[in-house]
Amino acid sequence: MNAASTQKRQGPLAGIKVIDLSRVLAGPYCTGMMADLGAEVIKIEVPDHGDDSRHLGPFIEGESVYYGLINRGKRSIELDLKAEEDRAILFQLVKESDVVVENFRPGVTKRLGIDFDSLKQHNPALIYASISGFGQNSPLASYPAYDIVAQALSGLMSVTGFPETGPTRSGESIGDVCAGMFASWAISSALFARERHNEAAQYIDVAMVDVLLSMQLTGLSNLFAHDKAPGLVGNRHPVSTPFDTYHAKDGLVVIAIASEKLFQRFCECMGKTHLCQDSRFQDDPSRTRHHGELRAEIEGWTAQKTVDEVCDLLLNAGVPASPIHNLQQATQSEHAQVRQVLIHLNDGGTPLISQPVFFNGKKPHSTRRAPVLGEANALYKSAKTTSKNREAVQ
């Protein structure tokens, strides 16, 4: 392996080979995280068309920015999985690999002969992850699912939005993204179990609806405590108060108070220490019941100041507060620069967004852009190209 290859293959998952049969978002997000951590990810794409996300806008010079962000650091080969000859190529790749990831609708992989039971015959130590909307054995398993469907069925939309305007989806496809995150976590756990406990092939089943349900800890705690489904409260926290957006002189400011000590400090900042002795605001439950009256007191103060003035005063006093940034502000902030949120490659093209975790002070990330469709066909589809030879040219 040459020096360039060694540089590219550093990271906690260096030496792991992943076959990516997935498309669009949940599966590719999972394998993109693994590529960031050093795994070799071979993306299998439909000949002449590729992943559907290649055709999703926006585009720069004819290339999908969306596809590029998700499929960083991977290799692309074209295989027609309905063709026996191409399936034979896949089987050979599976023999040399550690992981397969797919997000077909349940039942499709079995019809194609590329399901877990079929592929583990070629690799007894294979880790196979399936990501779907409802899971493999749900009564809804055969139905199509997009992220908004998962958000709706999981109850997440029922607690997102304002009473005046009704439920709304999250601003990002978090069902897909979080399912991809949980899948990468499960795959890494399975790899650890295989090494530590010598476990045989493992099958991982991730459902978007399950993922979103499992993440709603505040809502679930209210449901279990009151035996009543929580509803819409807008930006306000359903338990802690004040914990909301408030009108300042030039816009909205976020203020988040979740303890009596913080509330006292907040009142001191406002010059309204008498509120701490007011029976309506003596503790979190009382403040939540009287959130409207407390809002009037707070906005009587914030309305006299700019967002920056409110934030400077509160943050310096140790009270959580923030302006509401748009994505341009967020990605260009000093915080984003220090935390290496954007990865700028030497070619000067569109920046990449990588996995967000630092390991020993370093942030593993892809150093190669998303692949051109089929660019690695010759590398992986030739029976004469051995695994060692592939590593030498990467």
Image (tube, grey):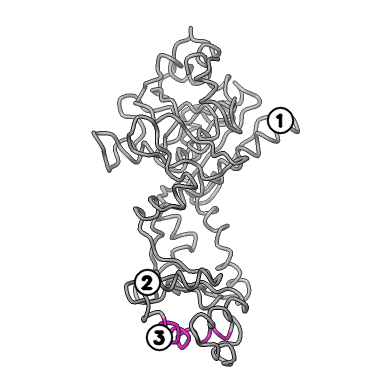
* Residue 98 belongs to magenta span: no
Three-letter residue code for mark 3: Gly
Residue that carries the numbered disc 2 in the rendered image = 252
Identify the amino acid type marked 1.
Answer: Glu
**Disc 3 versus disc 2: distance between alpha carbons?**
14 Å
**Contact flag, marks 3 and 1 (Cβ < 8 Å):** no
Considering only vertical position in the picture, is 356 above or below 364?
below
Q: Give residue 200's quadrant in the image.
A: top right
From the top left corner, tell me how far across and down residue 272 is, in percent.
51, 87
- The residue shown at (52%, 69%) is 316
Instruction: Name which of mark 3 and mark 1 comes first in the sequence.
Output: 1
**What span is in magenta?**
286-301
Q: Is residue 295 magenta?
A: yes
Residue hosting label 3: 300
Residues packed near mark 2 inside 10 Å, few (<14), some (14 to 19) or many (20 plus): some
User: What amino acid is at disc 2?
Assistant: Leu
Identify the main secondary structure in magenta: helix
Q: Which of marks 2 and 1 is nearer the N terminus?
A: 1
Horizontal and vertical percent position of residue 120: 61, 26
User: Mark 1: which secondary structure?
Assistant: helix
Q: Say which residue appears at 28% left-offset and 42% top-offset.
A: 57
- Residue assigned mark 1: 195
Disc 2 on helix, strand or loop? strand
Q: Name the secondary structure under disc 3.
A: helix
